[in-house]
Image (tube, helix red, strand yellow):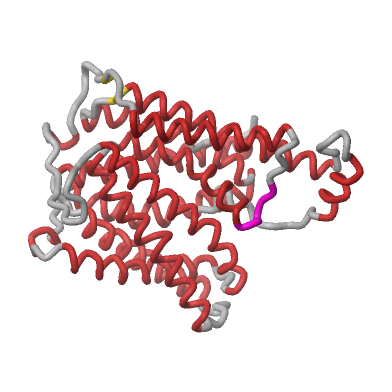
Amino acid sequence: MTMDEKKPYLAVLLVQAIYTVMFLLSKAAFNVGMNTFVFVFYRQAAATVFLAPLAYFFERKNAPPLPLVTLCKIFMLSLFGITLSLNFYGVALTYTSASLAAATTNCLPVITFFLAVLFRMETLKLKTTPGIAKIAGITICMAGAAAIAFYRGPTLKLLLHHHLLGHTHTQQPQLHVLPTKTWKTGCFLMFLSNFFWCFWLVLQGGVMKSYPSKLLLTTLQCFLSSIQSFVIAIALVRDPHEWQLGWNVKLLSVAYCGIVVTGVTYYLQAWVIEKKGPVFLAMSTPLALVFTIFSSAFLLGEIISLGSVLGGILLVGGLYSVLWGKNKEQKMDDDGICLTGDEAEKECAESKGSMETKSDPIMLV
């Protein structure tokens, strides 16, 4: 394998490593008392400051017009897909663990596919082997989510571990939205955050048709999300001390999530999709779970439960089942292979008539 052939594999490793550091830094910042709503605002503001000069320099001459209707659509996408998703994610992370956050990312492609089917952007043929694999994958993911939420089991704590920055206990910030801090509540909020993110993945394809400038669209969504996040944070966080950033893990996590995660991974994932396709990128998602489990145990001293491990395995299995079915179905359609036996001519005619070029909602960013 030549170096050029290795580059996509190295790129996905880097992408998942970046996400692993994001899970760890976010959890570490919340552990030392950073308010989750303030964190989301600072993160989106940092992303806007980073992307705005790039968008102006590269796409100012080719910027399409921005009608009011399109602006309203972008505003709503930013509200649900970014602002609410990140705020739910932040609160859920304080209730649970970095390992759980990494585990639930494996259900993103599955939820996205399910929503795409509801919006008729994807087809699901129940009488075919790929269709059965997709349904089985969705069912397995649901079982994994239930295992994580409702079954803790024995704890798996490594004997040798070090707490990041020397913090030996978790200091939770004062949250006013949820009065109780339970694992089940955190799991529910984490999956709700993922649902909003998948909703954004599916619907942004239509917005991109009316506003095809990707970098400007991303920058505009980050800017609108900054405003929305500020309104939420200023309404819920009145203590000025909670808005202060020092030269510590709080500032590091904000800068890293806003610049590296939003900027670097956006480019890397777009490049990987161009070279290898979205399925290849989605197949690498479980790597973040493996990296995060070991890193959080050593650096944050997190105690991993058996239920989290089993649930994570089920989520990974469900992910691969859906991706396998989707990939198999695409190959059959491309080769003109009939998917059923009794109604061969009908299936072939339908598949040939529906072979159009369209974006794959499995993993866009």
The residue sitting at the top extreme is 159
Image coordinates of residue 48 in percent, x first then y, are 36, 67
Is residue 153 rendered to the left or right of residue 203?
Answer: left
Seen from the viewer's position, the closer of residues 255 and 210 is: 210
Q: Residue at x 80, y 44 (%)?
A: 334
**Magenta span has 12?**
no
User: What's the magenta bit mostly, secondary-structure-wise?
Assistant: loop
Image quarter (top left, top right, bottom left or bottom right) of the N terminus: top right
Q: Is residue 241 above or below residue 351?
A: below
Seen from the viewer's position, the closer of residues 181 and 101 is: 181
Q: Residue at x 71, y 39 (%)?
A: 126
Seen from the viewer's position, the closer of residues 302 and 250 is: 302
Q: Which residues are magenta?
A: 119-123
Q: Is residue 354 above or below residue 67?
A: above
Is residue 184 rendered to the left or right of residue 333?
Answer: left
- Quadrant location of residue 354? bottom right
Image coordinates of residue 49 in percent, x first then y, are 33, 67
Seen from the viewer's position, the closer of residues 30 and 117 is: 117
Q: Is residue 338 above or below residue 88?
A: above
Q: Is residue 244 above or below residue 326?
A: below
Q: Residue at x 55, y 37 (%)?
A: 138
Image coordinates of residue 238 in percent, x first then y, are 11, 65
